[in-house]
Image (cartoon, grey):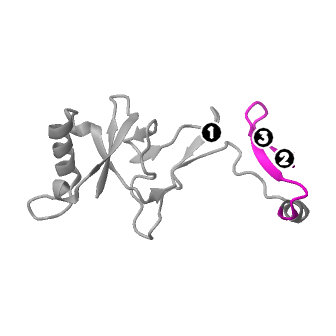
Amino acid sequence: MAHFAKISEENEVLQVLIVDDKDVLNSEGVETESVGQQYLETHNNWPANLWIQTSYNTLMNTHALGGTPFRGNYAGIGYEWDAENNIFWNEKPYASWVKDLATASWKSPIGDAPALTAEQEAQRTAGTNMWYYSWNEDNQSWDLTDHTA
């Protein structure tokens, strides 16, 4: 089965449809995006160029089954289609975050959260403290929090 994202003129994903493999094969029997786009235009009254194929098995530029990742992420409603980078992007979590093209994900402007210390990790594993880092947009920093129940 092939998956296609219906996008708006503003590149927002509006819907994701599954198309039978037979409806995306060209005359040589090869799966072709343009054939699927034409099929969807005919049957859904939406311009062919606003149907973009997406891979159900791709997340953060990694293919779940070990194959070749396709378009960064599986499209979801509300995602953004980035034609320049050929990636579907989920919603930006914070105004300051930037696109990481290698992982098709958003990153803080200062990088990943620090790792927990060995002591914090041991406490977390034991359940005595629930340490985690959360992004502080106002201070542009990672804040360590203990969320013990």
> For numbered disc 1, what is the local secondary structure?
loop
Q: Which residues are magenta?
A: 125-149
Of 110 and 9, the residue lying toward us: 9
For badge 3, the amino acid type reads: Ser
Which tag is nearer the camera, tag 3 or tag 2?
Answer: 2
Give how far apart the Cα atoms at labels 3 and 2 are.
18 Å
For badge 2, the amino acid type reads: His
Of 102 and 78, the residue lying toward us: 78
Classify residue 129 as left or right of residue 43.
right
Ranked by sequence position, the earlier of labels 3 and 2 is: 3
Magenta-span inclusion, residue 130: yes
Q: Are marks 3 and 2 in contact (CB under 8 Å)?
A: no
Q: Identify which residue is drawn at 29% across, 55% down.
A: 2
Check residue 97 in the rendering and tell me which mark sits there, or answer none.
1
Q: Is the residue marked by circle 1 packed among few (<14), some (14-19), or many (20+) residues within 10 Å?
A: some
Magenta-span inclusion, residue 65: no
Check residue 147 in the rendering and tell me which mark sits there, or answer none.
2
Which tag is nearer the camera, tag 2 or tag 1?
Answer: 2
| The image quarter in which residue 47 lies | top left
Give how far apart the Cα atoms at labels 2 and 1 are.
24 Å
Where residue 149 sits: x, y (%)?
Answer: 85, 48
Q: Identify which residue is drawn at 32% across, 38% down.
A: 6
Where residue 108 sits: x, y (%)?
Answer: 67, 43
Classify residue 58 as left or right of residue 45.
right
Classify residue 26 as left or right of residue 111.
left
Check residue 141 in the rendering and tell me which mark sits there, or answer none.
3
